[in-house]
Amino acid sequence: MTPIINTLDDVKLVPTPVRYSCWTIKGRVVEVREELRADLFVGPPRKATVILSNTYGDPFVEIGRLSTVRARAPTGDMHWRKMVMTLGVIRPKKRNAAWFDRDLPQDPVLIAWGEHTLDLSGLPLLTGNGVRWRSATFPAVWQEVSRCFHAIAKHDVWLDVTQAACDDWRRRHPDVAASVARAAA
């Protein structure tokens, strides 16, 4: 059994040569740059259940074959991110992967090996003024998703950075987090 990845400290980025190829007026140009990367999973595609957040912070489930999970340091205009995770999921009856980029620790990501059915209909609603990912219920929703996912997938859970995402949310929205703490008291 592979160990579970819970925090960014569990991911070690190492300098990796990366080959970039592009077309210019002079023809095809190939250049090799060194970037900080970690290939967490590369190999023959393996059945997996992946839970990610959409643009609004709502959870959605992808079930398919996981082909790649790669973490990399931010480059260029991504300086405000700590780490970027790229996931490749081959959906059933498809040949090519659907690619998802997620900002860590901002976005919650859960991965378990095998196919698992998870009902998201009983979750608390992401409500509030403005955009939902700023909702006061964001940590509660994602902690419930993580709890349900662990209850169903049990020992198959391989990656769960939900707690890191909730802690990052509280750090980025201290005014909303404080109002939730006052309401709970």
Image (cartoon, rainbow, N blue to C red):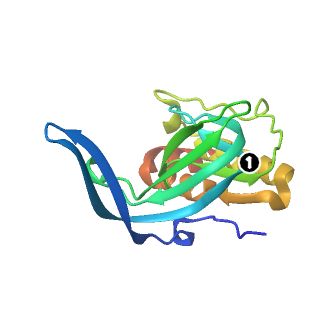
Q: Is residue 174 visible?
A: yes
Q: Residue furthest left?
A: 26
Q: Quadrant of the N terminus?
A: bottom right
Query: What residue is at 53 percent from the left and 47 percent from the top?
Result: 107
Q: Residues within 10 Å of mark 1 (few under 14, many from 20)?
A: many
Percent from the top left, x then y, of residue 114?
80, 49
Decide: is 126 above or below 103.
Answer: above
Q: Is residue 15 left or right of residue 53?
A: left
- Indicate the secondary structure of the residue bearing disc 1: strand
Q: Residue furthest top?
A: 130
Query: What residue is at 69 percent from the left and 37 percent from the top?
Result: 62
Q: Nearer the viewer, residue 108 or 179?
A: 108
Q: Is residue 137 visible?
A: no
Percent from the top left, x then y, of residue 88?
58, 45
Q: Is residue 93 left or right of residue 130?
A: right
Q: Residue furthest front?
A: 27
Quadrant of the image occupied by residue 13: bottom left
Percent from the top left, x then y, of residue 80?
32, 53
Q: Nearer the viewer, residue 144 or 9?
A: 9
- Identify the residue position indicated by label 1 in the image: 48
Percent from the top left, x then y, of residue 101?
48, 44
Query: What residue is at 45 percent from the left and 51 percent from the top?
Result: 174
Q: Nearer the viewer, residue 131 or 120?
A: 120
Residue type of the residue flagged with mark 1: Ala
Q: Nearer the viewer, residue 179 or 77?
A: 77
Q: Is residue 115 left or right of residue 26?
A: right
